[in-house]
Amino acid sequence: MSPADFERTARPDGWWRSAVVYQIYPRSFQDSNGDGVGDIPGITSRLDYLAELGVDVLWLSPVYRSPQVDNGYDISDYHDVDPLFGTLADLDELIAAAHQRGLKLIMDLVVNHTSDQHPWFIESREPGSAKRDWYFWRPARPGHEPGTPGAEPDDAHAAFAPSAWTYDPRSGEYYLGIFSPGQPDLNWENPQVRHAVHAMMRWWIDRGVDGFRMDVINLISKPSALTSGEALDPSPAGFGQIANGPRLDEFLVEMNREVGLDAQNLLTVGEMPGATVEVARRVTDPARHELNMVFTFEHVNLDQVGWNKWELADLPLPRLKENLAQWQDGLAEAGWNSLYYDNHDQPRAVSRFGDDSAEHRVNSAKTLATVLHLHKGTPYIYQGEEFGMTNAPLTHIAHYLDVESLNYHARASAAGVEEDQILRSLARKGRDHARTPVQWDDTPYAGFTTDIPWMPVNPNYIEINAAAALRDPGSVFAHFQQLIRLRHSDEVVREGRFELLLSDHDQVWAFTRTLGDQVLLIVANCSSVPAELPVDSLPDLDRAELILGTHPDGTSAVLGPWESRVLRLAS
Ligand code: GLC
């Protein structure tokens, strides 16, 4: 290996603290063979674009073999690529081509559950098999005929199905699938399961990957109620009961050690619905050797009532900024934050937290990005976010493809909820918004494919597309480039202490980042009307230098709609 190659592929201690991660949802990123589904060679063909954006790491949503019940989050072979996305050789090529450009690549690790088509599960269905205990099997509820309505072991719902229990006539028992029947939960209490997962992770590291994004990883240690055979809580909050189980830390420490995660400086980020700041502080404390960082759900659950994502609630700005600030404070001394608004499970940030009208889309996308990227932690960009892609006009149930949305529609309709109300919730929170194809240019199908795409392209691709953004020095894309550069070049952005200002202000998001005698002040108008800067409650702006702003004149005492400024204060 030449010194230059070594430099490009090296993972120095803590490298991920200055990194920006870009998430790719392969199915919707770029099709290369005209079948309407994005694929791995398509990703490789777009690496120069990603290098131009300036990100450091690519996170690939699952490309493993899968029946695609949940678009690949149901894996039937951890050691192969689904033909839909290409071949292992294509993936090797992608990893090498990424490394050549100084980009690292992390895989999605989905090990809370497998597909029901995974050979482990197929074997487990045999009652006397050595793998019976690799999953959770339970008899019918006492006094009920197995397989009849109401005979499930308890009333717990699955995230994407009416019951968490699925009847298997072969043995007359039920298995647990807290997402859907196609996603049976692995039993991590069994050490053989853990060893098999560790071996698989080592295999991927040997192939050259730089880390893992771990799907719902805080659900792997099931609550003792379940492991001792008691009933699960059937309410939506029951999901909270399943999270952060008693052996979570033990399993993560063991995984880290057995796989050599920290020893090899791999990036590890755990998706953790239901994790509190306290859990995150523990799990990401470097001294404990569990994970580098976690994805919290708290801020993306604020526009709903409790655990029910379909029950919509207003989200005043102070609640959002206070929540992020709480995580900044909670992880200030030990641990590390990941920073995100968007991913393949969330509606588009500019439509959700910003204003996606023609007048305000660009500035609101820039300002939201400014705020997020100036927090302390590792920022994540979701494909299309970097040029301000919006929610799609999904107005009829026939427009939805996602298993979660379809299940919600069926359940709510059966419960008598009005169609209008169901569609309103879906239009606000449905995961399909994130999954429309990336809008590369204004040619047919937005340059994503040459044939009918698996999911329709958002019709606004004529105006909103990557090619147009690349041509425009004032684009959202150009702003993201600047934010990424700033993180790379400025130690205050990476390591500075965070302090929220004006916490009650319902338009202005303001905070400082401080490292030694260096101070950055960020002020952002998160509304579509002008906002007066309450200068008396802010540090002295007289000798402040504007280092990044959305508007040319960054000195006025009034912030324009969706105007933001990053100011360096004189020391
Ligand atoms: C995670 C994934 C989501 C998936 C679920 C079950 O939340 O991000 O897409 O449906 O886990 O694997």
Image (spheres, helix red, strand yellow):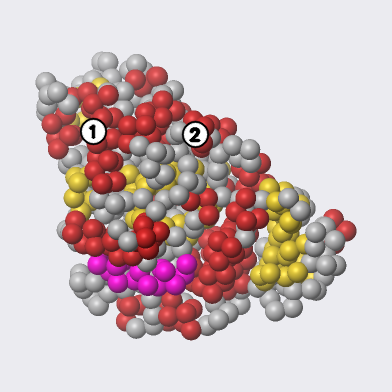
The answer to whether 236 appears left or right of 368 in the picture is: left
Q: Quadrant of residue 4?
A: bottom left
**Closer to us: 513 or 271:** 513
Q: Which residues are magenta?
A: 36-54
Percent of width and height locating residue 453? 27, 70
The type of residue carrying mark 1 is Ala
149 displayed left or right of 486: left
Residue lying at 55% horizontally and 66% vertically, measured from the top left: 485
Left or right of 127? Residue 449 is right
Residue 490 shown in magenta = no
Which disc number belongs to residue 285?
none
For label 1, the residue is 196
Residue at the outermost front position? 3
Dot 1 lies on which element? helix
Q: Is residue 44 in the magenta section?
A: yes
Q: Would you name the residue on which mark 2 appears? A: 283
Task: Looking at the picture, tell me which residue is in the foreground, 1 or 494.
Answer: 1
Q: Secondary structure at mark 2?
A: helix
Q: Which numbered disc flags the more N-terminal residue, 1 or 2?
A: 1
Residue count near mark 1 (Cα–Cα under 10 Å), binned few <14, some 14–19, many ≥20:
few
CA gap between label 1 and label 2 equals 22 Å
Q: Residue furthest right?
A: 536
Residue 523 makes an appearance in the image = no
Residue located at (51% from left, 36% from top)? 286
- Where is residue 110 drawn, in percent x and y? 32, 43
Amino acid tagged 2: Val
Crowding near the residue tagged with mark 2, few <14, some 14–19, many ≥20 C-alpha atoms within 10 Å: many
Q: Quadrant of residue 177?
A: top left
Residue 519 place in picture, x, y as percent: 74, 56
